[in-house]
Image (cartoon, grey):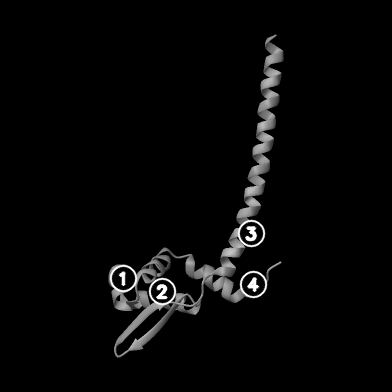
Amino acid sequence: MVQFSQSRFDAAFAALSDATRRGVLEQLGRADASITDLAEKFHMTLTGMKKHVGVLEQAGLVTTEKIGRVRTCKLGARRLEEEAAWIERYRELWAARFGALDTVIEELKKQEKKNGRKKRD
């Protein structure tokens, strides 16, 4: 079984749990941006955007660099590989369970069809 760094893992999922932060990651995937630009794009205060960027930065998903009075944000080095592997494990589990359920349903349909024909004869 794969072992995950629990605090890093939790920080990533906590950061991704917010729609604004997911939007910030999408925006930074297109181009680096200042906190001011991000705040304007998401119609928020600078303080609010700084908090969102701080959560993303703490999770390692974003890095910031201050040049003069401007703090520029860009995607961090984290690629969420551990989180993707965790999600994939559960996707496979659920796919197998739904596959088994489909088999049971098909069997019940066959039996119902078979039993229905006997009653009519």
In whole angstroms, how far apart are the C-alphas of marks 1 and 2? 10 Å
Q: Is residue 11 left or right of residue 101?
A: left
In space, the residues marked 4 and 1 are separated at their CA atoms by 34 Å
Q: Residues within 10 Å of mark 1 (few under 14, many from 20)?
A: some
Name the secondary structure under disc 1. loop
Of the residues shown, which amino acid type is indicated by label 1? Met
Residue 35 in view in this figure:
yes
Q: Nearer the viewer, residue 90 or 43?
A: 90
Q: Secondary structure at mark 4?
A: loop
Decide which of tag 4 and tag 3 comes sooner along the chain.
Answer: 4
* The quarter of the displayed image where residue 33 is located: bottom left
Return the disc, 3 or 1, that comes first in the chain's sequence: 1
Q: Earlier in the sequence, mark 2 or mark 4?
A: 4
Task: Write down the residue under mark 4.
Answer: 4
Q: Earlier in the sequence, mark 1 or mark 2?
A: 1
Sequence-wise, the earlier of marks 2 and 3 is 2
Mark 2 highlights which residue? 52
Q: Which mark is residue 89?
A: 3
Instruction: Report the residue marked by disc 1.
Output: 44
